[in-house]
Amino acid sequence: MIPAAFAQATIDREGETGAAWLAELPGIIEDLLAQWDCSVDGEVVHGQVGVVVPVEGAALKVSFPHPGNVHEPDAFEAWDGQGAVKLYERDDARYAMLLERAHPTTLLEHDEDVVVIAGDLHRRLRIPAPDGLPRMSEQADAWEEELRKDAAELDHPLPASVVDAALAVVDELGRDQPEILIHGDFHPRNILRAEREPWLAVDPKGYVGDPAYDATTFLRTRAAHQLGRDDLIKVLQNELELFAETAELDPERIRRWVHLNLVQSAFWGRRHGFGRARGGSELDRFIALCDELALSWIG
C-alpha cells in the first residue's frame, strides 16, 4: 500500500521517526477507511510528505506529522471549495483528511495559459484569514538572521547590494503583512485538474500574509521548469507581469518578494541542496540560476 519511493524518501528525511510512522501508516489508513466508510478505488499516490489513497468519490490523504502540515485542513475549510478541493472530513490527530478527488494531472504538465490559470486561481484563493493560523511576519527575524549568517559564511558571488536589497524586503514587506489567507506553497504541481472546476489548488500550508509572496514560489518553479532558455530572464519578467495582472497584484511587490526568495534560495542550495537536486551538476545549475536571476533580473 505504501509506495517504495515515498517510504525511502521519508526515512532519508526523517530517520527513525519516519520509519516508525511508516510502520504505523497501513494501520492508520485502514482505520480511517473504516471510520469514514470508504472503499479503496485506485492505486496509492504520494507527494513529498504524504500519501493519497483514491476512494470512491473522494481521496484520503495522510501526511507525516510535522508542524508544516498542521494548518492544511484549516485552509481548505476556510476556502470551502473556492479555488481549492473541498474538505469533507478531518482527523487532526493523525494528520488525515478526506478530500474532494482530483485528477493526477498538474498544471506543470499543461502547455497553454499556465500563468493566466494560476493567476486567476490565486486571485480567488485570496480571502480574509480565519483565526488561529500562523503569520508569515513571525518569520521575519529568522529570515534576517539567516541572510546575514549565510552572506558572511558562504562562498557566493552575490555583492552586498544584492543581499542588502533582500534584507530591505524583510524590513519593509516582511514584518507587517496583511491579514489574508495565503496558500504558502503555490506552484504548478499543487494545481490539479478536477471535475467540479477545470483546476483546483491542493497542499496549502495555510499562512496569514502577503498574497504577493505566493507568486514567488510559482515563478521560481516556472524558472526551474524552463532552465536553459536563452531568453529566460525576459520570459520570467513577462510572466511576472502577466501573473500580477491576472491575480490583481502589484508587480513591483511581487518582484521584491521574488528577489528575497532568490537570495534565500541561492544560500539554501549551497547549505542544503534542493528537494529535486541534492548534489552534483543539477544542484550547481539550480544555484547558478538563482545567482543569475538575483544579479541580473531582480538585483
Image (tube, rainbow, N blue to C red):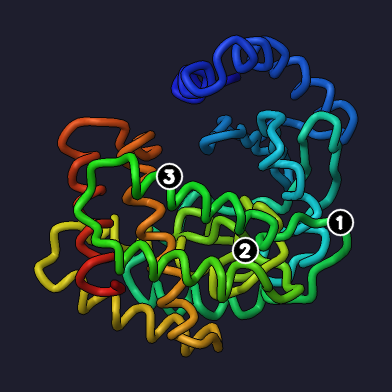
Q: What label sits on residue 195 in the rendered view?
A: 2
Neighbour class for label 1 at 10 Å: few (<14), some, many (≥20)? few
Sequence-wise first label, 2 or 3: 3
Disc 1 element: loop
Q: What's the CA distance linking mark 2 and mark 3?
A: 47 Å
Distance of label 1 from label 2 (alpha carbons): 31 Å
Give the quarter of the image for residue 135.
Answer: bottom right
* Secondary element type, mark 3: helix
- The residue tagged 3 is 149
**Numbered mark located on residue 132 in the image:** 1
Q: Amino acid at mark 2?
A: Glu
Circles 1, 2 touching at the beta carbon (< 8 Å): no
- Crowd rating for badge 2 (residues with CA inside 10 Å; few <14, some 14–19, many 20+): few
Q: Is residue 33 above or below residue 215?
A: above
Q: Is residue 49 above or below residue 292?
A: above
Q: Position of residue 82 (x, y in %)?
A: 72, 71
Q: 161 or 270, which lies in front?
A: 161
Callout 3: few (<14), some (14-19), or many (20+) C-alpha neighbours within 10 Å?
few
Q: Position of residue 105 (x, y in %)?
A: 46, 53
Tell me: 261 left or right of 71: left
Residue 213 vs 97, above or below: the answer is below
